[in-house]
Amino acid sequence: MKIGIIGTGYVGLPSGVGFAELGNQVTCIDQNVEKIESLQAGKLTLYEDGLEELFVKNIKEGRLRFTTSMKEGVSGADVVIIAVGTPPHPVTKEADMKYIYAAATELSQYLTGYTVVANKSTVPVGTGDDVETIIKKTNPFANFDVVSLPEFLREGFAIHDFFNPDRIVVGANTEKAANVIKELYKPFANKTKMLFVKRRSSETIKYASNAFLAIKIHYINEMANFCEKTGADVLEVAQGMGLDSRIGPKFLNPGPGYGGSCFPKDTMAMAYMARQNNVEMSLINAAIEGNKARKKQMAERILEAVKDIEAPKIAVLGLAFKDGTDDCRQSPAMEIIANLLEKNANITAYDPKAMGTACQLLGNKITYADDMYHPLKDADVLAILTEWKQFRELDLQKASMLMRHKNIVDCRNLLDAKKAVEAGFKYQGIGKKAEPSTSESSTHQTEVA
Ligand code: NAD
């Protein structure tokens, strides 16, 4: 099939590469000239595991192209996928639809023959109707259908998830459009459930799913607070809960709060839609408020560890909102760092993939390290903020010799508390009581190369 994809971000780019790998002719369109020039030059604009190999292969084999020209990408396409951003409106926090409406207006001029316009962006209920109206108004002769095709990929696993989707949800109001999407996803027909629903149901499924996951995270974080007070261990509690098939083990990892470009904005957009429809959604509102407070609590926890130290040095490991990505949008790490900077903290940080994206947000407000040991030099506390696997391998003896004061606040429960204590650290994880250091003093200073 011939596919045009509008938007080459964290959804559009992996999807474009994936559809090309399935044998389709894909043209990715973006208005960001810099991004397109980079992609045309064969240089990726974001990090996703496994993306580069398929990106290079499909360009070489002539199935994948990049352009800033809407005409080039849309003319002759069987399916045009909209994958532009829907960020929170700066004031109301509803989904800001300006990119969707602009894309719909622009693409409508270049539709040729019957085309399915598929909305992969996360959009408020009724957006399919709006896009349809815009296209009809701009191009009354266009022969098209608009479908909702929500995206469920997880950043960091975008390529894996593209080829192994849990489910494919399609909101199509005509059989003709449903059949085109069936054809598009034919390679998955034997292994993935395809759910065909009303367009408005499909739009709702995406928000309902993300809000539910956000609530689940907020729930286990509150449970973690409870465990810290009572002597229970939240990881054991989560394990016990997760064995119940009605609950399931996923999304029961306590941490510094949910982040990223989706959960915060989608919960706020869902809450906004509920208010607009006079529907009380207290759980979502509680998750939003609780999650905001969570980042502050984590910053306070880090500051508490160094409260008696003058001008403390804080070592941060992890800046991305989760492992496997360079995305720092709404990262808990960014918000915790912002809280620490308000208290004039002196921060040196390291992240395996997100140094560039973090630097775009934080500029010279913190110091950037070359590896995971560099921030520890003379630090008074180590704060672990992203669950990168390599941080699990931290050599605690080496860390202990590098640091001035031996304090760890492990917001991801990555390290072994017992080993940290044995290495002389005062260790505070999430959801269990802090482990005091076994050594007399938690101070140690030795030069380590
Ligand atoms: P993004 O900000 O990374 O990328 C959006 C891209 O669209 C940008 O490159 C921008 O330049 C481009 N764009 C905007 N308007 C355009 C126009 N008129 N013409 C051409 N290009 C245009 O966004 P993203 O993270 O890929 O998210 C896209 C949508 O998918 C959002 O609605 C998001 O909620 C949803 N979503 C995201 C994820 C995720 O993990 N990031 C997962 C599922 C769904």
Image: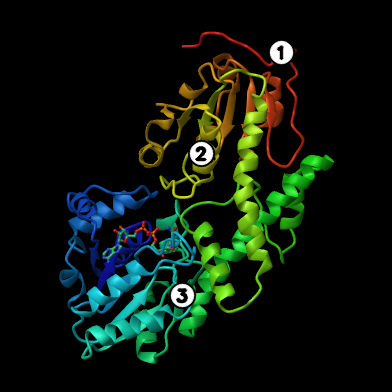
Instruction: Give the labeled residue for mark 3.
Output: 190
Residue farthest to the right? Answer: 230
Instruction: Let me know if residue 384 appears in the view.
Output: yes
| Front residue of 23 and 101 | 101
Q: Residue at x 75, y 39 (%)?
A: 432
Q: Is residue 426 above or below residue 193?
A: above
Q: Could you tell me how far apart the alpha carbons at marks 3 and 2 are, in whole angstroms?
A: 47 Å
Q: Earlier in the sequence, mark 3 or mark 1?
A: 3
Residue 441, numbered circle: 1
Q: Residue at x 47, y 57 (%)?
A: 154
Give percent across and percent down for residue 239.
Answer: 73, 51
* Residue contact between numbered discs 3 and 2, judged by CB atoms under 8 Å: no
| Three-letter code, disc 2 | Ala
Q: Is residue 295 left or right of residue 338?
A: right
| Three-letter code, disc 1 | Ser
Q: Is residue 435 left or right of residue 319?
A: right
Q: Which quarter of the image is occupied by the N terminus? A: bottom left
Q: Which numbered disc, 3 or 1, marks the residue closer to the eye? A: 1
Q: Earlier in the sequence, mark 3 or mark 2?
A: 3
Q: Could you tell me how far apart the alpha carbons at marks 2 and 1 are, in whole angstroms?
A: 30 Å
Instruction: Give the labeled residue for mark 2.
Output: 338
Give percent across and percent down for residue 86.
Answer: 40, 64
Q: Earlier in the sequence, mark 2 or mark 1?
A: 2
Quadrant of the rendered image holding ligand 1: bottom left
Helix, strand or loop at label 2? It is helix
Helix, strand or loop at label 3? It is loop
Label 1 environment density (alpha carbons within 10 Å; few <14, some 14–19, many ≥20): few
Q: Could you tell me how far apart the alpha carbons at marks 3 and 1 are, in whole angstroms?
A: 62 Å
Q: Residue at x 60, y 37 (%)?
A: 299
Residue farthest to the top? Answer: 446
Helix, strand or loop at label 1? It is loop
